[in-house]
Image: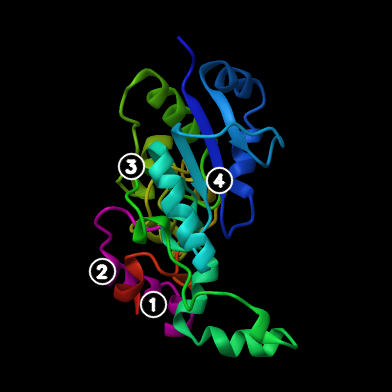
Amino acid sequence: MSPPTLAVWKFASCDGCQLTLLDCEDELLEVAARFQIADFGEASSARIAGPYDLSLVEGSITTEADRQRIVAIREQSRVLVTIGACASAGGIQALRNLADVNEFAAAVYPQPGYIDTLATSTPASEHVTVDYTLHGCPIDRGQLLDTLTALAVGRRPRLPGSTVCTECKRRGTVCLPVAEGIACLGPVTRAGCGALCPAHHRGCYGCFGPADQPATPTLIPLLRRDGMSDNDIDRVFSTFNVAAPWHPEAR
């Protein structure tokens, strides 16, 4: 029996989440043994035509060609997993959604008429059905490997919906807002990073996006208490996951 086929696709993104897979080093050999890597432009020019058992999609949809391409990929993929903040929430490039993209194009390009772009940067889920999502900017290596292993053996991936606060408790990290008055988005940010920033004495800045039930309105007064102005609060929610569900509440 031949192994399941794996394809990795890039849309508007920095490639960092694809590189997370390549950075698996020794485990990458195990991935290659479990899957037939059919299409992965970041790693090889060799390509095998679909259909595919599993597609990993990085990047947001920003052009009409992107929109048509993600629909075609969905049709060829038995399971589709979006990886990273760009694919799951539109990425930092979704800042364009809050302004007029034509004004940006006119300011940057001498002949903006040649620029083919949509007015917004959107996640793949706004165009096709997504089976699973790995959040983060970039995604977590361990979570990626666990997801690939699970799908290879027919198990549902273990994807957290709780907050970074739970990870701080697990690793014994002192709560920065409570103990030191350091502003932190941990109470509303999805777990998955291992509370990396709080463990290094830095408040969480939300790169994994909102948890399943983010109590953002409750957090806002605490951020103000810890020295953030309304402009600071607006900016801290306007980064990797600016178009994620927490943003309307944050404003």
Identify the residue under disc 2.
218
Using the image, determine if residue 67 lies above or below residue 249.
Answer: above
Toward which corner of the image does residue 103 lie, by quadrant? bottom right
Identify the residue under disc 3.
131
Q: Nearer the viewer, mark 2 or mark 4?
A: 4
Identify the residue under disc 4.
9
Using the image, determine if residue 20 lies above or below residue 163.
Answer: above
Determine the secondary structure under disc 3: loop
From mark 2 to mark 4, how far is it between C-alphas? 38 Å
Determine the secondary structure under disc 2: helix
Q: Which of marks 2 and 4 is nearer the N terminus?
A: 4
- Residue at 61% from the left image edge and 85% from the top image edge: 104
* Tag 4: amino acid: Trp
* Tag 3: amino acid: Asp
From mark 3 to mark 2, how far is it between C-alphas? 31 Å
* Tag 2: amino acid: Thr
From mark 4 to mark 1, how far is it between C-alphas? 41 Å
Q: Is residue 46 visible?
A: yes
Q: Which of marks 4 and 1 is in front?
A: 4
Residue 98: % across, % down: 45, 82
Residue 230: % across, % down: 42, 83
* Tag 1: amino acid: Arg
